[in-house]
Amino acid sequence: MRLMVFFDLPTVTKAEKRAYTLFRRFLLNDGYDMIQWSVYGRVVNGFDDAETHLNRLAASLPPIGSVRCLQVSEKQFASMKLLLGVKKLQEKKVNAAQMLLF
């Protein structure tokens, strides 16, 4: 299962830029990979693990902005179509069939 985080955060003032940086660092330190700008995702092991990471995410939210989260199965994630651009290194190395082995 994958946990996807989508966010839109203001970066006008110095405080807003700091909040953005802290939130992005939290995502990276918590095991999320950047899929594209302001879209991050991570693998979770079932609903209990997803709930744990959602609680961590909720505790680290910036004061203002928009943050959304979506849980998708590994099969749904693997069926995502790349319409423009190239796959990132992580996407090339690990496919859905390999993820199901873990």
Image (spheres, rainbow, N blue to C red):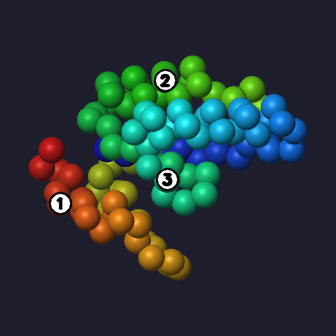
- Tell me what residue is drawn at x 47 percent, y 28 percent: 54
Neighbours of disc 3 within 10 Å: few (<14), some (14-19), many (20+): some
Q: Quadrant of the N terminus?
A: top left
Q: Quadrant of the C terminus?
A: top left
Question: Does residue 74 appear to the left or right of 32 in the view shown?
Answer: left
Q: Secondary structure at mark 1?
A: helix
Identify the residue under disc 2: 56
* Above or below, comparing residue 2 to residue 35 in the picture: above
Give the spatial CA distance, label 2 vs label 1: 28 Å
- Asked where in the image residue 42 lies, by quadrant, the reply is top left
Q: Residue furthest right?
A: 13
**In the image, residue 82 lies at what x, y percent?**
45, 74
Give the spatial CA distance, label 3 vs label 1: 21 Å
* Above or below, comparing residue 61 to residue 16 in the picture: above
- Asked where in the image residue 20 lies, by quadrant, the reply is top right
* Above or below, comparing residue 77 to residue 87 in the picture: above
Q: Are marks 3 and 2 in contact (CB under 8 Å)?
A: no
**In the image, residue 50 lies at what x, y percent?**
38, 31
- Tell me what residue is drawn at x 69 percent, y 29 percent: 62
- Asked where in the image residue 91 lies, by quadrant, the reply is bottom left
Q: Secondary structure at mark 2?
A: helix
Identify the residue under disc 3: 34
Name the mark nearer the viewer: 2 or 1: 2
Q: Is residue 71 visible?
A: no
Nearer-N-terminus badge (2/1): 2
**Image mark for residue 97:** 1
Nearer-N-terminus badge (3/2): 3
Question: Does residue 73 appear to the left or right of 68 in the view shown?
Answer: left
Q: Residue furthest bottom?
A: 84
- Tell me what residue is drawn at x 17 percent, y 57 percent: 98
